[in-house]
Amino acid sequence: MGKYEHIDMSYLDELALGSNEFKVEMIESFLKSTPESIMQMKEAISATNWKTVGGVAHKLKTSFSFVGMENMVQLSREIQDAGLEARIEDIPRMVEELEDYYLKSEVELENELEELKNN
């Protein structure tokens, strides 16, 4: 599509095989679970549970790839590796960066969702 700055729906379009219903389900699931995952990572940071941070980041990688957020796939991979290796100094900054980018993409995803529901 190329009409968005933060997301690329090409991969999801390919997976959906023309099913707008599938795309709606995937986007709704992403919009529901991603903020929960970010909150879970922030709580794990507060509790200095770096393994949990890494595990949640691992799950987010797949979600970000569905909506074409390749830079967030990479950032999630970096958070995952840092969490699993207990390289903690950069994790809070990276999670904040991830959250900021997600919030920017959220508007685009909601627009895409609205468009899909109206077609």
Image (cartoon, helix red, strand yellow):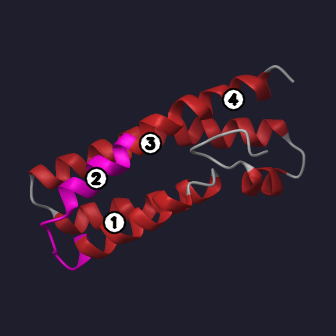
User: Does residue 98 lie above or below 50 as drawn?
Assistant: above
Q: Which mark is residue 55?
A: 1
Which label lies toward us, 4 or 1? 4
Measured from the top left, where is residue 16 in percent x and y? 81, 50
User: Residue 42: percent from the left, percent from the top?
Assistant: 21, 47
What's the amino acid at mark 4? Leu
Secondary structure type for disc 3: helix
Q: Is residue 85 magenta?
A: yes
Label 4: how many Cα within 10 Å (few below 14, some 14–19, many 20+)? some
Q: Which residue is mark 4?
A: 113
Q: SS class of the residue under badge 1?
A: helix
**Residue designated by label 3:** 102
**Tag 4 and tag 3, C-beta contact below 8 Å:** no
Task: Tell whether 63 sits left or right of 15.
Answer: left
Q: Which residue is mark 2?
A: 95
Res. 36 image quadrant: top left
Mark closest to the chain's N terminus, 4 or 3 = 3
* Mark earlier in primary sequence (3, 2): 2
**Nearer the N terminus, badge 3 or badge 1?**
1
User: Callout 3, which amino acid?
Assistant: Tyr
What segment is highlighted magenta in the picture?
Answer: 83-100
Q: CA distance from mark 3 to mark 1?
A: 18 Å
Q: Amino acid at mark 2?
A: Val
What element does badge 2 sit on?
Answer: helix
Give the quadrant of the N terminus.
top right
| 2 or 4: tag closer to the N-terminus | 2
Using the numbered discs, state the Cα–Cα distance from disc 4 to disc 3 in whole angstroms: 16 Å
Say if mark 2 contacts mark 4, CB within 8 Å. Answer: no
